[in-house]
Image (tube, rainbow, N blue to C red):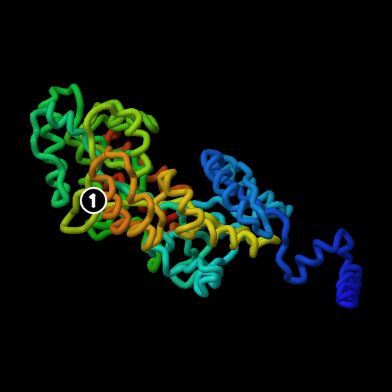
Amino acid sequence: MKSRRARIAALCTIVGLTASMAACSADSGEESTSPVVIGMNSGLVPQFEAYAKVYNATNPEAPVEVKAIPDGQDDYIQQLVTQGLSSTLPDIVFNYDSLNQTLVSNNLLYDLGPWLAEGKDGLKGDSFIPAFLNQYQAEGADGPTTGIPVSADSTMLFYNKSLFEKAGVTELPTEQWTYDDLYRVAEQITTASGGAYWGLRTPAAAGGLLFVDYPILSAYGSEIYDAEANAFVFADEAGLEAWETILAPYVEGWGSPYPTASGQDGNYFAAGQVAMSLDTRPAVSRYRTDLADDWDVMNLPTIDGNPTVGGGSYGLSIAEKSDNKEGAWKFMAWFYSKDGGMKEAEPNGVIPATVDGLENGSWLDDPNPVPANLIPATQYAVANAQLPNAIPNEVQPKLVPALEKAAQEVLVGGKSIEEAYTAAQDELNALLEK
């Protein structure tokens, strides 16, 4: 052993690495025992500090510590790029589905695919629901997997029973509802209210919520971006039909007012001003606190027999330049295990993005009776979520503004749906050609 240490020390001297034997130890392939640093969105820092406390109590060789990162996407990306240049990146990086491609293009993320394939430390790729894990697969089906989803967030229909009763409408949402049913009943409620409240709040027409727009496009047989053709196609014949459906509550005048400012109608359901709302499951905790009326949730209605459920997730990744990838992976293996981190996370509203977590997670034992249909609606939503494929990094930041502009041109500027969305599609495709 003395001879081996001498040879290692000599090698460090030869290559000029005289700072410490610890640095050389890491280069020799031995696992670092320095803390694993998690860079986490500030809103989730308290939760992850609690998870780290539980994990560290298991006496890991590399304990975990949590540091806050900027909330704004641009600031966060800039920080990561700067830290990457100076090799000061966190070992575990906060990620989310629509950000993954950008982080990959900046060479910031480590390919977790081989470890997931072998089930290293019990963490297996095939245990995850493909629709959610695939959001972290860069460069197509054969590309690297650079993140693991934490929570399977998905959309469902929230409805205010008190407003239905007030409007004299007895037909409540069911699992068999289609979009025709949704719109028919929403219009009845708006008409009955005399303008005092509305039948439906839908954020789709604002253009900024792809988890609402994409599933409707998909249900009609269109999509946002065709990876094989490397082209945006959301203004094809099926796509234009989808946009007509998406914009109908505003065009026909019985939906809540078109949001001319971001977030303008964000409190309509919580304030008891709309009878129905398309929203994500995490909104449940907010409405439990803010809404005094009798309310429940239901599966989103179908279009031509196709589900219209959207979804997304935030995830954890390992930094490409981390010197402690093994320690980072051990924490992640614990965190994603049913009896480890998920046991701690599910009481915070996390729905594990795994088949077992969806079928057997402790979230199924939620003792809160409101909303009454939460468990089956969540199971349906996660299992049927339609998630878009990755948008090329150079154009991805332009997509939402282009869709928002198209909606505004229709609803405020008087353009036809075909004219506005074809122009948006052409604009984005022109960027792909540069």
> Can residue 232 be seen here?
no
Type of residue at label 1? Ala
Q: Position of residue 261 (x, y in %)?
A: 38, 30
Residue that appears at 54% across and 59% down: 334
Q: Is residue 263 above or below residue 418?
A: above
Classify residue 205 by image quadrant.
top left
Question: Is 45 displayed left or right of 400 in the figure?
Answer: right
Foreground: 215 or 323?
323
Q: Nearer the viewer, residue 76 or 27?
A: 27
How many numbered discs, if any?
1
**Residue 132: which quarter of the image?**
bottom left
In the rendered structure, the answer to whether residue 192 lies left or right of residue 120 reads left
Q: What residue is rendered at 27% in x and 26% in y?
A: 292
- The answer to whether residue 110 of the structure is visible from this angle is yes
**Circle 1 sits on which residue?**
242
Q: Position of residue 123 (x, y in %)?
A: 50, 66
**104 left or right, relative to 10:** left
- Tell me: 97 left or right of 237: right
Is 314 or 403 nearer to us in this picture? 314
Residue at disc 1, secondary structure? helix
Using the image, determine if residue 68 lies above or below residue 260.
below
Dot 1, how many residues are within 10 Å of its Cα: few (below 14), some (14-19), or many (20+)? Answer: many
Residue 65 at x, y = what percent?
65, 48
**Residue drawn where x is 44% and y is 43% of the image:** 348
Q: Quadrant of the N terminus?
A: bottom right
At x 48%, y 60%, the residue is: 337
